[in-house]
Amino acid sequence: MDFFIKSGSPEKQRSACIIIGIFATRRLSGPAEQIDSVSDGYLSALLRRGNIEGEIGQILFLQQIPGVLSERVLLVGCGKERELNESNYQKIIQKTMQTLNESGTLEAICFLSELHINGKDNYWAIRQGIEITKDTLYSFDKFKSQKTKKRRALHKLTFITQSRKQLSKAELAVTHGKAISSGIKACKDLTNMPANICTPLYLAEQAQQLAEQHEKISVSILDQHALKDLKMHSYLAVAQGSSNPAYLSLLHYKGGETAQKPIILIGKGVTFDSGGLSLKGSAAMDEMKYDMAGAAAVYGTLKAIADLNLPLNVIGILAGAENMPAGNAYRPGDILTTMSGQTVEVLNTDAEGRLVLCDVLTYVERFDPECVIDIATLTGACIGALGHNISALLTPHNGLAHELLKASQQAGDKAWQLPMDDEYQSQLESPFADMNNLGGNAAGTITAACFLSRFTAKYTWAHLDIAGTAWRPAGPNKGATGRPVALLTQFLINRSDDQQ
Ligand code: BES
Ligand code: MN
Ligand code: ZN
């Protein structure tokens, strides 16, 4: 699937299909008016007869309109013009692309990028148009013997930008949209892999392959011996009950000057989280194959920034481990000595993510980071707090919080900041060790972040809890979302703009 931009009037386009908006109730958009006037009122007559009202979700294919060069015109309901916002735009593009793809249309020219969306510009409309299209047409059918792919699938989509002045911004929108979408796809494909295939070793192999594809990415893999030499006893404890050994994979992207400090992204890569001896219930346990979505988001983001050739140094880390119950598994009550020297009493083996991450957070001190962001499906409590649309952001650093929230808004990849006041730290007290790993029932997302904060004193750090947003749970749309690749890539685009 490829994307292009051009300018020009709708009736003069020679394409299999042009896509035109209709507003509620029965009102023509600008391009629709142009078609109407060359066709002697063809569209207005149609609307008068009540063939389409213009509500969101309504759609009408027309053929051979007089005076129009394209064979077909797809009319798309866009709702009330005044109410056109981000989420309506998303619904409109989704519906359009589903319809086109099902109709066997190979190529189309889309005038919907000219719609005026409150507070958004043409750059945004084109970039979102690309991202939403790729997201809508995504399917994970690697394991289906009958592929769902259409023999005649949509493969060329051109967005319209009218003013010449906007052309270079529109081109940038295509570049960004394509790179982010391909990062999102890479993230989804990896996240959706079942845990019998996607083991920590598999994550390491994917990291290796990504490095082979990009000149500016190199890879290093730490196996369990290396992790043991580094005294990452907490990380290793999580993996010790599994017959799939842990691997820590590091992707070094060098796009900046040698002296430029690296931005570090750490992804939780628990390839299956059974809960360990604190075993989870069987309802929806299959979804714990997605517990490596943080690592997959780091992987997808590195792919996107390498495609964009950003002038930054970034280290992306996939912290792979599998959490299983076994005779040699770690137990509730065990006391672990982390790489930092701090000790942890394990009160629940299902709070394993923080035990993996804490050692990696200590490990990255050696890179003298510009800042560190960890991304993790860390707490079920996050779903209780924010649901499935908004990721949680926790950080003691206001500047970094501000930057990440801004990137989140720009990218349409929602996040909301939760507090991490010192008072919460007392929930981590243990009578026998420096802290416990459970934190109790109240404010589970916050106490998990407070736990991590004890390992991040040496640098600027933020934590993204993506437990609710990384995948859609059971239902017709079940599967990975590719979040928060868009947010992270936007953050890095903004950082590289600051560099120049
Ligand atoms: N991976 C889970 C968090 C999770 C649960 C994400 C459900 C998405 C859906 C994490 O390892 C976990 O099990 N957390 C525990 C922590 C608790 C024991 C303190 C949780 O949230 O129940
Ligand atoms: Mn768990
Ligand atoms: Zn987990």
Image (cartoon, grey):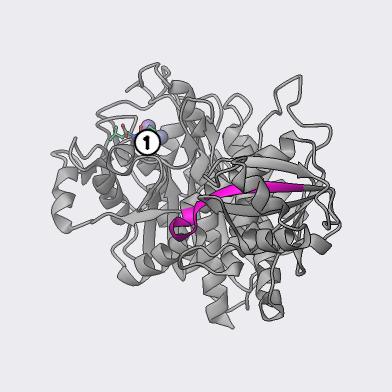
The C terminus: image quadrant:
bottom right
**Quadrant of the image occupied by residue 152:** top right
The answer to whether residue 296 is above or below residue 104 is: below
> Residue 276 at what x, y percent from top left?
39, 24
Look at the numbered disc 1 and give the secondary structure of its residue. loop
**Quadrant of the image occupied by residue 39:** bottom right
Q: Quadrant of ligand 2?
A: top left
**Quadrant of the image occupied by residue 203:** top right
Outermost residue, bottom direction?
500
**Magenta stretch holds residue 17:** no
> Residue 467 at what x, y percent from top left?
40, 40
Left or right: where does residue 447 sit relative to residue 415? Answer: left
Does the rendering let one see residue 156?
A: no
Residue found 69% across the figure and 69% down from its top = 161
Of residues 48 and 273, the one drawn nearer to the viewer in this rendering:
48
Q: Which residues are magenta?
A: 73-86
Q: What residue type is disc 1 on? A: Glu
> Residue 373 at what x, y percent from top left?
44, 58
Of residues 108 and 415, the one drawn nearer to the viewer in this rendering:
108
Of residues 157 and 243, the one drawn nearer to the viewer in this rendering:
157
How would you rate the neighbour count of disc 1 (Cα within 10 Å): few for under 14, some for 14-19, many for 20 or more? many
Residue found 66% across the figure and 55% down from its top = 303
Residue found 83% across the figure and 63% down from its top = 12
Does the rendering let one see residue 286?
A: yes
The answer to whether residue 37 is above or below residue 70 is: below
Residue found 62% across the figure and 47% down from its top = 47
Left or right: where does residue 391 sit relative to residue 481? Answer: left
> Mark 1 sits on what residue?
352
Q: Is mark 1 within 8 Å of ligand 2?
A: yes
> Residue 104 at what x, y percent from top left?
79, 36
The answer to whether residue 258 is above or below residue 332 is: below
